[in-house]
Amino acid sequence: MVRNPVGVEDAPDLQAILDALDDPDCRAIVKQLDEPMTASEISDATDIPLSTVYRKLDALTEASLLSELTEVRSDGHHTTRYDLDFEEVSFSLTEDKEFEVSVSRPSRTAEERLADMWSEVRKET
């Protein structure tokens, strides 16, 4: 699940975030993402098998902690890069004793927002 590119987003899923952050491989991936990377680059940097990396990237993306960026190439072979999509995750307890989660997002440049929209279009085709 990639964040809505126009900025309208549902509340993050508490359990998906907890599950992703509880996973040591997911945490290793988060530690490596100083800049957008492909799944292969992440696999090489973390020594996690590529098939496992794809599952962990899905979990982190589903938890709205990563964004997928499509790198458009002139040869038609586009590449997906993954980048962190949060600055802070906070958990709180409501008056009804329910847990809430909030995710602080980095500000997005116009170029990043355009890349997000392109990623969404590519998924539809």
Image (cartoon, rainbow, N blue to C red):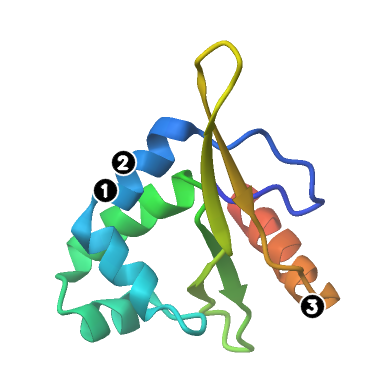
Task: Tell me which residue sits at (54%, 46%) in the image.
Answer: 90
Q: Which residue is mark 3?
A: 111
* Front in this rendered view, residue 62 or 20: 20
Please name the amino acid that badge 2 sits on. Answer: Asp
Q: Closer to the N terminus: mark 1 or mark 3?
A: 1
Label 2 near label 1: C-beta < 8 Å?
yes
* Residue nearest the observer in this picture, 42 or 98: 98
Q: Residues within 10 Å of mark 2 (few under 14, many from 20)?
A: few
The kind of secondary structure element at disc 1 is helix
Q: Circle 1 is placed at which residue position?
A: 22
Which amino acid type is marked by label 1? Asp
Lower sequence index among marks 2 and 3: 2
Does residue 122 appear left or right of residue 57 in this picture? right
Q: CA distance from mark 1 to mark 2?
A: 5 Å
Residue placed most toward the observer, 30 or 113: 30
In the rendered structure, find residue 19 and report the number of the disc placed on it.
2
**Figure check: 43 above or below 21:** below
Residue at left offset 19%, top offset 62%: 51
For this orientation, the residue located farthest to the bottom is 74
The residue that appears at 85% across and 74% down in the rendered structure is: 110
| Label 1, label 3: how far apart the Cα atoms are | 32 Å
Q: Secondary structure at mark 2?
A: helix
Query: Please, what secondary structure does the residue beneath circle 3 have?
Result: helix
